[in-house]
Each structure stands twice: as structure tokens, then as C-alpha cells.
Image (tube, grey):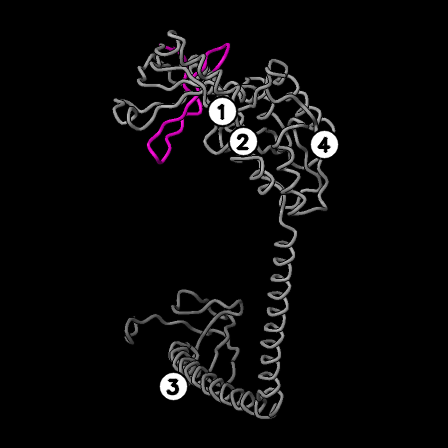
């Protein structure tokens, strides 16, 4: 029983071992930065990792203020400092005195290269993104059945609209098998068409933990989905390629539920508002129609229709009078023209000459005789007088010129 330690005593003992190790007092550690955070106090917290492992790191303000660059996630560095134990959490970490840039991390390079490739194919274009249903009948969830992300989604969904069913498709969200399971889940939901929208995601983590959502097959499955997808991967500062391919990105799983699940109480208030607006509009419409009917009822058409007819009758009389005047003017003008033309015809009429004592001589065949050479003795002729006709026989013909006998 003498070897029983309290947690604190054991942690202090382990820390003393670290502090006495000459190799750990001053070390040079090469790795890639992730989860870098600059605290308002000036201290910097980060994770230093490679393909096989990771270690927590901290650089206090007294040293961080001398940095010549801004550390960022994905940046490869060489950290110089001491490895010791943080007693409160019981974990070892690197207390960095200096950070030396050493290029860009391999995962970040892979991320950017794949992002450029898929963007060039149009998988991230806004034009191909689908709209979310205003009131989904069912919601699908693709995530780990044991993660906090599922609990957050269920909690928010049930609070906002407990009547909408949620369907979980359990998958791994990290590790070598995770991408294949996520792709299969999306494809199965699309084949069954049992939900109106999908939430695909997990809680936050390091870039390695989130890497399944940077997998090319996962990104292509999200882009090809006929069901709208909301990505809910990581926290607000974490972006994955799944976020770019999804129809909508949520910073957290809780926010995804806020986006997808309508607030039933807000819907009720909205419906009540619409109902009130509809009733007010109907009342206002009826009021305006009633006023219009009253105006028509009080108009002369209904109260004094005879005056309307009297006005119209007066207009007709006025038009008839104007029409009569126009007709009379036209007739007078036509009569004047007719008289003038009649007089002209009378002057030109050859029979009018007969009234002055002249006569017209012609053969029985109708040939007008203008010269004695046209007739022969004993030839019958017809003489047309002003009044009547004579039939005579030629006894003698004498020829003269201008009244003188030839």
C-alpha cells in the first residue's frame, strides 16, 4: 500500500522526470501547425504534428511578441523549447521558446491541390447548389452515432420542431474507413429518397481528424447528391472541401440543425401574421368594394336615369340638326351645279336653234343635209321644225355661196 499515489502526486512525479531529462529541457521539434489560436492574453496555443503523431504546444506572450511571422495552420515549423507536463490536465506538452518556419505542411498542400482541381471542374459553383426545403418532411443525418455532433443536432431539432422525423445513418467520421462509409450513406439516402435534406458532418478536430471530409470521393458524392446537403464539419474556423461542395455550410452541427429544421413556434407566429394580414386585406378590399358600390348606387345613372336619357336625347337632336344643315348645304351646292350644267347643255343643244326660226333637213335615213349636192330632184326629205316635222319632195336644187345663187 506504500506505492499508492494521488493523481496530483503521480503527475508531479512524472513532471519531475521530464524536467530532469536533459534531452527534453531543450529540444528541436519539426512538425506541422494545426489548431493555432492566438489568445487575447497574447499567448499562442497550437498543435504540432506529423503523419504519425501530435503534441500540444504553447508559446507565452513574452516569447510570442518577438515572432517575425504569423503562424498559421498547415505551416511547417521547427519549434525550439522544453517538453514538460501540464499538471492540471496531466498531459505533456511543448513550451516553445522559438518557432522557425519550415515550409507548408503536406496535408495543406494536398488540400489546396485537390481544392483547385475540383473547383476547376465546377463542383463548387453556386449555380449547381440546390435550395433547402422550407419545411422538410424528413431529415437524414450522416455522422458518428457516438459523437457530440449527433446529440447537438437532435437537441436543437427536437427543440425547434419535434414533429420532423430524423433518420441517422451511422458512419465513422475519421480514419481510413470513414470516407467509404460516408459515400455509401449519401448514395443510399439518394437511392431511397426517404428524406428531403441531409446533414453530413462531425464535431471539430485537427486537420487529420477532419481529413475524411477532404477525401475526393466524399466531395464528389456530396456534389452529385440529388438531395440537398448541409455540411456541418468542425467548428467555425474549420473548413473542409465538403463545405465547398455542399449546398449549404454550417459552422457547427448545432447551426446545421438551426438551418435545416424550421422553428415550429416561429412558423406558428408567421402563419398567425399571414392570417392577420389576409383578414385585414379582405376587410380592406370589401370596404373599398362597398364604397364603390355606394358611389355607383348614388350616381345619376341609378338615381336620375331620365336625366341621362334627356342629355342623350338633346345630343341626338343637336346631331340631327347639324346633319340636316349639312345635307341642305350639300343639296344646295349640288342643285347649283346642276342648274349651271343644265344651262350649258341648253346652250349647246342644236335643237334650241330651231326656236329662232331655223330648221333641220335630213334624209329619211337620218343624214343631215348641208349642201344641195347631197340631194336629187324628187328625193323625199324630212324637215325638223321647232315644233313638228315636215316630209317634202325636192323639186329643184339651187346651189349658192354665202346667200348668192351660183
Q: Does the magenta stretch include residue 49?
A: yes
Q: In which quarter of the image is the N terminus?
A: top right
The answer to whether the residue labelled 1 contacts the one labelled 2, judged by CB atoms less than 8 Å apart, is yes
Of the two numbered discs 2 and 3 on the same chain, state the one appearing first in sequence: 2
Whether residue 113 is visible to the viewer of this picture, yes or no, is no
Which badge, 1 or 2, comes first in the chain's sequence? 1
Instruction: Please tell me which residue lies in front, 243 or 301.
Output: 243
Sort mark 2 into few (<14), some (14-19) or many (20+) by Cα contacts within 10 Å. Answer: some
**Which residue, given by chain and number where applicable, does mark 2 sit on?**
128
Q: Nearer the viewer, mark 4 or mark 1?
A: 4
Q: Nearer the viewer, mark 4 or mark 2?
A: 4
Q: Could you give the CA–CA distance between mark 2 and mark 3, rounded to whole angstroms?
A: 111 Å
Q: Is mark 2 on a helix, strand or loop?
A: helix
Few, some or many residues within 10 Å of mark 4 (<14, 14–19, 20+): few
Magenta-drawn stretch, dominant element (helix, strand or loop): strand
* Circle on res. 356: 3
Q: How many marks?
A: 4
Quadrant housing residue 199: top right
The residue labelled by disc 1 is: 122
Q: Which stretch did the figure color magenta?
A: 28-54
In the visual, does 162 lie left or right of 208? right
Report whether 38 appears left or right of 66.
right
Earlier sequence position, callout 3 versus callout 1: 1
Q: Distance between the residues labelled 4 and 2?
A: 19 Å
Q: Which of marks 2 and 3 is in front?
A: 2
* Image: 313 above or below 1: below
Are the residues tagged 2 and 3 within 8 Å (C-beta)?
Answer: no
Q: Is residue 396 above or below residue 124?
A: below
Of marks 4 and 3, the one in the foreground:
4
Image height of 133 relative to 86, above or below: below
Query: What residue is shown with label 4?
Result: 193
Marks 1 and 2, how far apart at CA: 8 Å
Amino acid at each position: 500500500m506504500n506505492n499508492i499515489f494521488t493523481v496530483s502526486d503521480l503527475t508531479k512525479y512524472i513532471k519531475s522526470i521530464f524536467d530532469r531529462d536533459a534531452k527534453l529541457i531543450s529540444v528541436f521539434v519539426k512538425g506541422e501547425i494545426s489548431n493555432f489560436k492566438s489568445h487575447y492574453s497574447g499567448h499562442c496555443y497550437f498543435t504540432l504534428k506529423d503523419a504519425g503523431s501530435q503534441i500540444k504546444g504553447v508559446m507565452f506572450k513574452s516569447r510570442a511578441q518577438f515572432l517575425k511571422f504569423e503562424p498559421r495552420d498547415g505551416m511547417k515549423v521547427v519549434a525550439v523549447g522544453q517538453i514538460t507536463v501540464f499538471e492540471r490536465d496531466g498531459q505533456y506538452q511543448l513550451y516553445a521558446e522559438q518557432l522557425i518556419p519550415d515550409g507548408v505542411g503536406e496535408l495543406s498542400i494536398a488540400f489546396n491541390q485537390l481544392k483547385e482541381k475540383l473547383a476547376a471542374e465546377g463542383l463548387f459553383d453556386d449555380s449547381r447548389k440546390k435550395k433547402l426545403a422550407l419545411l422538410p418532411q424528413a431529415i437524414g443525418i450522416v455522422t458518428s452515432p457516438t459523437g457530440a455532433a449527433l446529440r447537438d443536432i437532435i437537441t436543437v431539432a427536437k427543440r425547434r420542431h419535434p414533429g420532423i422525423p430524423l433518420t441517422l445513418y451511422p458512419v465513422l467520421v475519421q480514419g481510413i474507413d470513414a470516407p467509404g462509409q460516408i459515400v455509401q450513406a449519401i448514395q443510399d439516402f439518394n437511392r431511397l429518397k426517404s428524406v428531403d435534406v441531409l446533414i453530413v458532418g462531425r464535431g471539430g478536430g485537427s486537420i487529420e481528424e477532419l481529413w475524411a471530409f477532404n477525401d475526393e470521393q466524399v466531395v464528389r458524392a456530396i456534389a452529385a447528391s440529388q438531395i440537398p446537403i448541409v455540411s456541418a464539419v468542425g467548428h467555425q474556423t474549420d473548413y473542409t472541401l465538403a463545405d465547398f461542395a455542399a449546398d449549404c455550410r454550417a459552422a457547427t452541427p448545432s447551426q446545421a440543425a438551426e438551418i435545416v429544421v424550421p422553428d415550429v413556434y416561429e412558423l406558428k407566429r408567421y402563419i398567425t401574421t399571414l392570417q392577420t394580414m389576409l383578414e385585414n386585406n379582405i376587410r380592406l378590399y370589401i370596404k373599398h368594394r362597398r364604397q364603390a358600390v355606394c358611389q355607383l348606387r348614388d350616381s345619376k345613372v341609378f338615381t336620375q336615369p331620365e336625366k341621362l336619357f334627356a342629355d342623350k336625347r338633346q345630343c341626338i337632336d343637336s346631331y340631327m340638326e347639324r346633319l340636316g344643315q349639312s345635307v341642305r348645304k350639300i343639296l344646295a351646292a349640288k342643285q347649283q351645279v346642276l342648274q349651271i350644267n343644265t344651262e350649258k347643255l341648253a346652250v349647246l343643244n342644236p335643237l334650241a336653234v330651231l326656236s329662232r326660226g331655223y330648221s333641220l333637213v335630213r334624209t329619211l335615213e337620218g343624214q343631215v343635209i348641208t349642201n344641195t349636192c347631197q340631194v336629187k330632184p324628187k328625193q323625199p326629205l324630212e324637215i325638223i321644225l321647232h315644233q313638228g316635222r315636215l316630209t317634202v319632195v325636192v323639186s329643184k336644187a339651187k346651189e349658192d355661196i354665202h346667200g348668192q345663187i351660183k
